Image (spheres, rainbow, N blue to C red):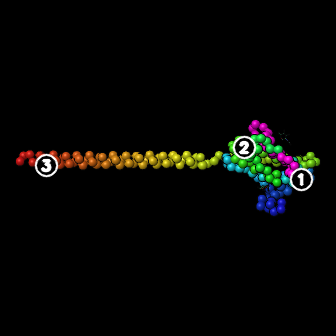
Amino acid sequence: MFLMRTRSWNNKSLLLILCLTGLYLSTNGVMILIPHHIVSATVNESATLSVEYRCNGVPTIRWKQLSAWGMKNIITWEPGNYQNISESYEDRVQKYRNGSIQLSNVQLYDAGCYVVTVTDKAGSSKDGVIVLNINEPVYKDLHFVAVVTTVLMAVSIVLMFFLWICNQIMQLCKMKGRAQRVNASTDMELSPL
Ligand SMILES: *[C@@H]1O[C@H](CO)[C@@H](O)[C@H](O)[C@H]1NC(C)=O
Ligand SMILES: *[C@@H]1O[C@H](CO)[C@@H](O)[C@H](O)[C@H]1NC(C)=O
């Protein structure tokens, strides 16, 4: 299953992973696999920080956020035993059997480094790091553009109507002037008689 999953990756990362896996297995019994070290999400959407671990016995899994303000605990759990979720994450973190977590309703302040630590009963542990990027939604800008376009279109329609009215009035004036001139010339022609 592990090999099948890695087959789609390129050869270099496959080699690197095999080396690292060998290194992990030779040093201690805990192993963390992270398919994507950089994850992107949009404001108000959810982000999955996906990992998989291998270890003997029941581990303790701990997720922390590393930001400019320091380390912040998110969730710590021992599968089947207990879980401890930080107050600020209570309603918006979900854990998965493979050690992954999902943050829902992410905001700009969620951007940063996330560190997962898996510790086994013998006390050996491994860390994994995932960087989370948060994008601002694009539709706000699009909405603004749509509003501006509508306003500009309305203004130009009003302007065109105004020009048309002006044009009509000018035509009317011209016709009146011509009619007056015609009247005057007929008067002049008639007066000597
Ligand atoms: C872990 O489980 C979650 C939920 O089932 C899944 O979305 C994620 O892809 C899994 N991670 C790995 C590395 O298999
Ligand atoms: C849960 O976290 C709180 C605050 O970080 C800590 O005081 C408490 O001892 C923890 N409980 C367990 C069972 O780890």
Extent of the magenta region? 61-83
Q: Residues within 10 Å of mark 3 (few under 14, many from 20)?
A: few
Tag count: 3
Q: According to the image, label 2 marks what residue?
A: 110
Q: Is residue 71 magenta?
A: yes
Query: Disc 2 on helix, strand or loop?
Result: helix
Quadrant position of ligand 1: bottom right
Does residue 44 show up magenta in the picture?
no
- Mark 3, residue position: 186
Q: Are marks 2 and 1 in contact (CB under 8 Å)?
A: no
Tell me which amino acid carries mark 1: Cys
Where in the figure is residue 192, as x and y percent of width and height?
7, 46
Which quarter of the rendered picture does the N terminus lie within? Answer: bottom right
Residue 133: image location, x then y, percent: 71, 46
Distance of label 2 from label 1 (alpha carbons): 29 Å
Looking at the image, can residue 37 be seen? no
- Marks 1 and 3, how far apart in space? 114 Å
Among the two numbered marks 1 and 3 on one chain, the one whose residue lies closer to the N terminus: 1
Using the image, tell me which numbered label, if any, was put on residue 55: 1
